[in-house]
Image (cartoon, rainbow, N blue to C red):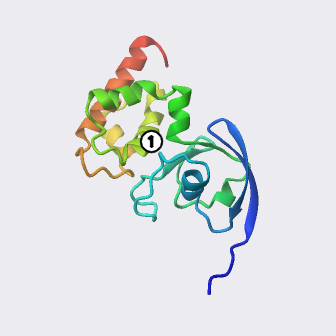
Amino acid sequence: MNEPQSQIAITCVVNGEKVHAQVPARQHLVDFLRQELGFTGAHLGCEHGICGACTVLVDGALVRGCLILAAQADGTCIETIEGAAQSGRLDDLMGAFVDCNAAQCGFCTPAMVLTAGELLDLPVKPTRVQIREQISGNYCRCTGYQAIVDAVELAYDRLHQKGSR
């Protein structure tokens, strides 16, 4: 027999918008974002925090949305790939993903872009080893990672040539 889950009131900011919600006590953040708010860029893969497909930013830190409960997000600021796209802050990286064919099936791409985005603010261009280390928690079954590393390098070069960073 299924017992009803208790509901918890939360308030958070998701992609710049304040959200008030009642969430089931055991609902994961990624499920809340996808099912309740319609932000489907964070994907469910392994549901154990290993594949990285559910990665979002919580208070500026990369987190696995399947490992944090929605109730734990109370009082936080959350950014999904949709928020990053809307703000334009990762446009150069997303463009480089397209130019380098780094987004083949697209399942890992939202989390990969958010994860790699941290590298764009470094004062010195990251090495290919550093890029691979940064994205190592995100599985990609299509690209072999070479195109993703190429895209991060290209985006970094473009941003720093423009003087945007």
For the point 55% across and 58% down, which residue is it?
31
Position of residue 93 measured from the top left corner of the image (x, y, whole percent): 40, 29
Residue 59 placement, left or right of 88: right
Q: Nearer the viewer, residue 76 or 163?
A: 76
For the point 52% across and 33% down, which residue is it?
84
Residue 158 placement, left or right of 75: left
Q: Label 1 crowding class (10 Å Cα cut-off): few <14, some 14-19, many 20+?
A: many
Residue type of the residue flagged with mark 1: Thr
Q: Nearer the viewer, residue 34 or 70?
A: 34
Position of residue 9 measured from the top left corner of the image (x, y, whole percent): 77, 58
Q: Is residue 16 above or below residue 137?
A: above
Q: Quadrant of residue 2?
A: bottom right
Disc 1 secondary structure class: helix
Residue 144 placement, left or right of 38: left
For the point 37% across and 47% down, which residue is it?
108
Q: Quadrant of residue 153?
A: top left
Position of residue 147 measured from the top left corner of the image (x, y, whole percent): 25, 36
Q: Nearer the viewer, residue 88 or 22?
A: 22
Residue 91 placement, left or right of 97: right
Position of residue 155 measured from the top left corner of the image (x, y, whole percent): 37, 25
Q: Is residue 48 above or below residue 118?
A: below
In the rendered image, which quarter contains the N terminus?
Answer: bottom right
Residue at the top extreme, as displayed? 162
Instruction: Look at mark 1 in the image and give the residue it sits on.
Output: 115
Q: How many marks?
A: 1
Q: Is residue 62 above or below residue 151?
A: below
